[in-house]
Image: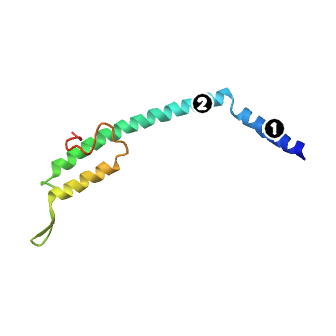
Amino acid sequence: MPGKNTEIIGNFYLQFLEKWNISHLLLETIFAIIATAFLIALYVILRTLSKRVFRFIESWRGTRIHSLRFQSLELISATQVTNVLLNLVKALRVFNGKDNPCYKDSYY
């Protein structure tokens, strides 16, 4: 019985070695480089878009974004609505980079 287990493990190891030859490793390296380049491009695009969205929302403050009113009672001011939208966009960003949301003018 011990010889049988050794043979099974040996066959498994040979299959593993056949799978991981140099061409397979080279292909996996190329895929890793492509994936890294894609993620860097995605990061740059999302960072640029988030800055534009900040400016866009800020330009709407008081013009298109109005306060929430019920008859004559103001429930939420336009500034609060804008701040909520800006905070939602900040929360959606995955990477922070140099743009620290703790600083007021970090998105300009």
Q: Which residue lies furthest to the bottom in this view?
A: 71
Q: Where is residue 80 in the image (x, y as percent from the top left)?
A: 18, 58
Residue 17 sits above or below residue 6 on the image: above
Horizontally, residue 48 falls left or right of residue 108, namely right
Q: Residue at x 30, y 36 (%)?
A: 98
Q: Helix or strand or loop: what does disc 1 sit on?
A: helix
Whether residue 91 appears in this view of the structure is yes
- Per the image, the residue denoted by label 1 is 10
Q: Position of residue 45 (x, y in %)?
A: 34, 38
Of the two numbered discs 1 and 2 on the same chain, state the one appearing first in sequence.
1
Horizontally, residue 71 falls left or right of residue 91, namely left
Residues at marks 1 and 2, CA–CA distance in whole angstroms = 26 Å
User: Which quadrant would residue 47 be assigned to in this image?
Assistant: top left
Q: Residue at x 15, y 58 (%)?
A: 78
Tell me the kind of residue under disc 1: Gly
Which class describes the residues within 10 Å of circle 1: few (<14), some (14-19), or many (20+)?
few
Horizontally, residue 48 falls left or right of residue 73, namely right
The reply to whether discs 1 and 2 touch (Cβ–Cβ < 8 Å) is no
User: Which quadrant would residue 105 be assigned to in this image?
Assistant: top left
Tell me the kind of residue under disc 2: Leu
Q: Residue at x 25, y 54 (%)?
A: 85
- Per the image, the residue denoted by label 2 is 27
Residue 20 sits above or below residue 50 on the image: above
Mark sitting on residue 95: none
The mark lying in front, picked from 1 and 2, is 1
Q: Position of residue 70 (x, y in %)?
A: 14, 71
